[in-house]
Amino acid sequence: MAKKQEESLLGYDPLAWMNEEPQGEEVSAAQEQEQVASATEHSSNAQVTQENQLKVVLEAVQNIQNVANLREEIISKLENSLGAIEIDASAVNSIDTATLQLFVALKKETDRLERVLVFDFPSERFLEAANLIGVSKLLELDKSASGFF
Amino acid sequence: MNARVVAIFNQKGGVGKTTTSTNLSHALAKAGKKVTVIDFDPQGHLSISLGMLNRQASGIDAVLLDGADVSQCVIPMRENLQLIPSGPKLHDIELMSTGGAKRSEILRHTLLNDFQDQDYVFIDCPPSSGLLVANVLFATDEILIPMSSDFLALQGLSDLIKTIRKFEQVLKKKYKTQIVMARYTSSRKFSKEVLGKLQQYFPQQILATVIRETAVLSECTSFGMTIFEYRPKSVSANDFHNLAKDFLQGKVM
Ligand SMILES: Nc1ncnc2c1ncn2[C@@H]1O[C@H](COP(=O)(O)OP(=O)(O)OP(=O)(O)O)[C@@H](O)[C@H]1O
Ligand SMILES: [Mg+2]
């Protein structure tokens, strides 16, 4: 990594991220199951949400500190409606593994329930992070990425 | 036999893409290989470097936009070396919002079918990662990345690799990727460190010969000459001669 060696003239190593590849931070199966389990045990306080309220807008910084709130928000939308859950990922500047793990768990759960979970306008950063830990395919981000053409 | 098609690509400007395209292709042509270079940069620097001054001649722009035949726009430049210029309309493609996929298909089809008599086709890419480059990355499977020996080039390479990965993921293919140190300032200690970093992250992917930074290489362009014509006895001619050998033999560091 960007370890400063003796008499190195290079302050920071822009390629250090490559050491994390391939899929160094891969979501482990155990962690995944845990996420799914906790994602499903949520109690429903039945109140049907309107279709147009099924949009979840991600914040610029998504990390372990707000992942719990995010999870609550998505699950309540999931439980109180039947429409597609749209996650607007356009503003994301920074996203961590915990949040991406949450999405992986949710994606599996929505697939199982035959519900739709889509990411709208994922930002470069969001795509990069998902690519880095190897979940873009699972999250079906390929379509958004191909907007690059 | 199909030609081996290589995109000479680095979105960072001034790292030596055109200089490498010019002199590596001429070195290979001198070694008896049949080589085509495609000027995929609307600035047309490759054409100028080879001494082609007619900027209105249509080229790859006509192939992509008007369905022109490749045979109509190849220009023989040296023995065994032919050029397809960018053409005056190539710039328009960068700004078009539709038809990208179709043009990529045309390019891929052209590269697969229209160069059967050639050994190598090099594509000199523009310094961007816009639509033109997307077309090239769609249509090719091999990339040669020229690098200079400074920090920002290293930073740029990090972004470049991410771009390549993205394409690999979307297109579900893996590029053969090689690097050439095309502007190596041997007098600076820092250059050695940059090269060391490259070796660390890209083992077996850097062509063994380093092209040193020299005055003659920057001079020959204005004469429309390759280094083999301008200063055939110079260290730079020797560097490119060796680089061509590495390229042919797959000699890497
Ligand atoms: N090894 C070298 N020694 C000295 N000058 C060089 C060397 N390589 C390239 N140059 C000079 O540096 C400038 C930029 O090089 P070149 O045009 O090959 O880069 P490029 O990557 O094609 O640039 P662009 O991104 O604008 O297309 C030119 O003036 C060229 O003559
Ligand atoms: Mg150039």
Image (cartoon, rainbow, N blue to C red):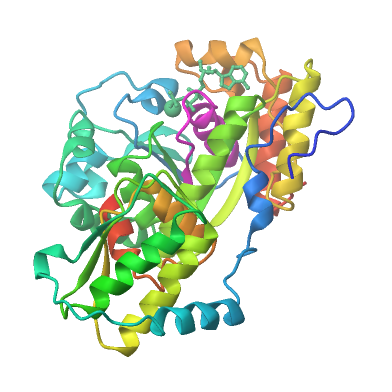
Q: Is residue B200 left or right of residue B33?
A: right
Residue A45 inside the magenta-drawn segment: no
Residue B8 inside the magenta-drawn segment: yes
Q: Is residue A130 left or right of residue B207?
A: left
**Residue A140 appears in the picture as rendered:** yes
Q: Identify the residue at the far front of this view.
A: A45
**Identity of the residue drawn at 67% across and 25% down:** B237
Judge whether A5 appears above or below A52 on screen: above
Question: Residue B146 location in percent, x, y?
Answer: 57, 35
Judge whether A75 appears above or below A90 on screen: below
Towards the viewer: B139 or B249: B139
Towards the viewer: A149 or A27: A27
Question: Residue A107 location in percent, x, y?
Answer: 37, 76
Q: What segment carries the magenta color?
A: B1-29
Residue A14 occupies quadrant? top right
Question: Residue B192 location in percent, x, y?
Answer: 79, 28
